[in-house]
């Protein structure tokens, strides 16, 4: 049975991580999986709470000494993960655990990369103000010019480890999904619809700095695509 490694970066997610772990356990019943929590020194005890789940659920914790960023946390999780199938999702319950089986099933049907998408039929967003919806939609439309998916900024995706083995990924900002979509060695990418819900616990970490990093990332990927064509 293929082992599914679910990589979840955390910073101050003490309230949500037990709920996420329980929901994953239910959604993936009968499948072999591990939840790899990569914690950036959360002062609220996220790492300790996650580790305490291990007797009941397949949870492992990668502890990092400080807040080094979501993208680098995901790459640290990839390095520590034991599975050949890797799933990335947020800890704040905005990505539904119940959609993870559909992402994995898409790989089983031949996809190299399955992206959870808000912007295909059946997908959507909930509880977002209009300003946030507009920013997200514009960001995805710009990203779509560089990658073949409608939800270019999705942080919810599954892939076979083989498509990134030996690939240099730049751990910049929040949008590691965009980086993976742009640089992984894929022949077939599919989008799986889901409804994004705003975090139920804690405070959003999205801000102007993340927008600036995304713009920088767009520029780097566009530059690299041009250089490959020369």
Image (spheres, grey):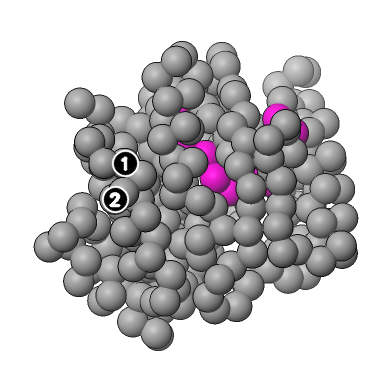
Looking at the rendered image, the quarter that the N terminus falls into is top left
| Residue at the spot of label 1 | 28
Q: CA distance from mark 1 to mark 2?
A: 5 Å
Looking at the image, the residue that sits furthest to the bottom is 43
- Place residue 226 in its image quadrant: top right
In the picture provided, is 172 more to the left or to the right than 223? left
Find out whether residue 18 is within the magenta segment.
no
Q: Is residue 21 above or below residue 161?
A: below
Looking at the rendered image, the quarter that the C terminus falls into is top right
Residue 25: mark: 2
In the picture provided, is 204 more to the left or to the right than 79? right
Residue at (68% x, 68% y) in the render: 206
- Residue 9 in percent (x, y) is at 44, 60
- SS for callout 1: loop
- Magenta stretch: helix, strand or loop mostly: loop
Badge 1: residue crowd in 10 Å (few <14, some 14–19, many ≥20): some
- Place residue 56 in its image quadrant: bottom left
> Is residue 194 in view from this perspective?
yes
Residue at (87% x, 55% y) in the render: 134
* Label pair 1/2, CB-CB below 8 angstroms: yes
- Residue 23 in percent (x, y) is at 37, 55
Q: Nearer the viewer, residue 181 or 120?
A: 120
Q: Which residues are magenta?
A: 149-159
- Residue 75 in percent (x, y) is at 43, 49
Residue at (64% x, 52% y) in the render: 196
Residue at (68% x, 40% y) in the render: 123
């Amino acid at each position: 049975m293929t082992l599914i490694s679910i990589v979840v970066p955390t910073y101050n997610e003490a309230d949500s991580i037990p709920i996420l772990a329980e929901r994953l356990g239910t959604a993936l019943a009968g499948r072999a999986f591990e939840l790899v929590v990569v914690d950036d020194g959360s002062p609220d005890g996220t790492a300790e709470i996650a580790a305490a789940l291990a007797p009941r659920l397949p949870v492992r914790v990668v502890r990092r000494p400080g807040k080094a960023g979501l993208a680098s946390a995901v790459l640290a999780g990839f390095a520590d993960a034991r599975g050949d199938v890797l799933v990335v999702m947020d800890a704040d319950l905005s990505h539904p655990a119940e959609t993870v089986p559909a992402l994995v099933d898409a790989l089983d049907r031949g996809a190299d990369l399955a992206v959870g998408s808000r912007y295909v039929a059946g997908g959507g967003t909930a509880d977002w103000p209009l300003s946030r919806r507009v920013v997200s939609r514009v960001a995805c439309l710009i990203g779509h010019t560089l990658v073949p998916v409608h939800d270019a900024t999705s942080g919810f995706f599954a892939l076979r480890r083989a498509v990134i083995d030996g690939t240099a990924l730049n751990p910049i900002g929040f949008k590691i999904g965009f980086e993976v979509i742009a640089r992984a060695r894929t022949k077939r990418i599919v989008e799986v619809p889901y409804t994004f819900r705003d975090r139920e616990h804690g405070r959003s970490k999205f801000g102007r700095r993340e927008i600036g990093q995304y713009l920088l990332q767009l520029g780097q990927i566009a530059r690299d695509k041009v250089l490959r064509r020369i």
